[in-house]
Image (cartoon, helix red, strand yellow):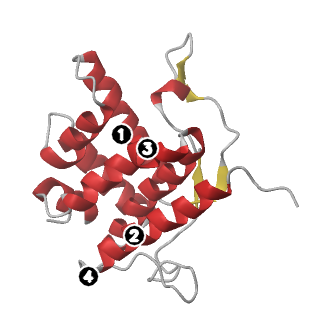
Amino acid sequence: MPVDPHAHLQIRLIDAVEQFAAQLSGNGFNLFDQRTGRSTEDDFFRPAVFQHGDPGVQNLIVGPDGRVSFIDWENAEDRGAPFWDLLVFLRAYAVWSSRRRRLRSRLGAAVEHFVDGSTLSPFILDAMAEYRRAVAVPSEAVEPLFFMAWVYQAVNEAPRLQRDRLADGQFVRFLDALVQRRDAPLLRRLLGAVEA
């Protein structure tokens, strides 16, 4: 019987997600209901949204008329998760804009704009709040959706990483930074989609 060369990655990813969930659970946050495999709030807060699936700045084009469009739609889903495209796009834009200022670290850029605060942070807060209102996502659902967006990105990134370098993935490191700094004032506002 042939051995799947990527089986070790799947096992390491499952372990990583379980460790991440345990770390959050220890802080009073349950990521998954172990019995059903669904988020703890069931699906009451999860309206389906159309999702591009890879909305980074690399997938934007500006037409001759000045209209901005997304390309690269092979990951699109008609029943996607709220916030995921917005978060991925905002992070990609934050990293891109920081590189324009010669800040080289993707992690540093993302943490600056999502946790520490920057000139871009008010825009991120406004975008999150407006999106939450437009899609009618209850504020208590924002935090699980927020963290699951980054777990999903980390899982998608894993096959591109060396087996012994999974912990070095940009999304795993960002997720770790977010969990470690979950009580930062800016991040708390994002996680409640800015009701405070």
In terms of sequence position, does the residue under pointer 1 or pointer 4 come before the other? 4
Q: CA distance from mark 1 to mark 3?
A: 5 Å
**SS under mark 3:** helix
Q: Of 1 and 95, which appears nearest the observer? A: 1
Give the number of the disc on residue 19: 2
Residue 12 appearing in the image: yes
Between circles 3 and 4, the one closer to the viewer is 4
Name the quadrant of the C terminus: bottom left
User: Is disc 4 surrounded by few (<14), some (14 to 19) or many (20+) residues within 10 Å?
Assistant: few
Which amino acid type corresponds to the residue marked 1 in the rendered image?
A: Arg
Question: Label 2: few (<14), some or many (≥20) within 10 Å?
Answer: few
Residue type indicated by callout 4: Gly
- The residue located at (32%, 30%) in the rendering is 95
Q: Is residue 60 left or right of residue 141?
A: right
The residue that label 1 is drawn on is 91
Report the side of 152 relative to 71 (left or right). left
Q: Which residue is mark 4?
A: 28
Question: In this figure, which residue is indicated by the disc labeled 3?
Answer: 88
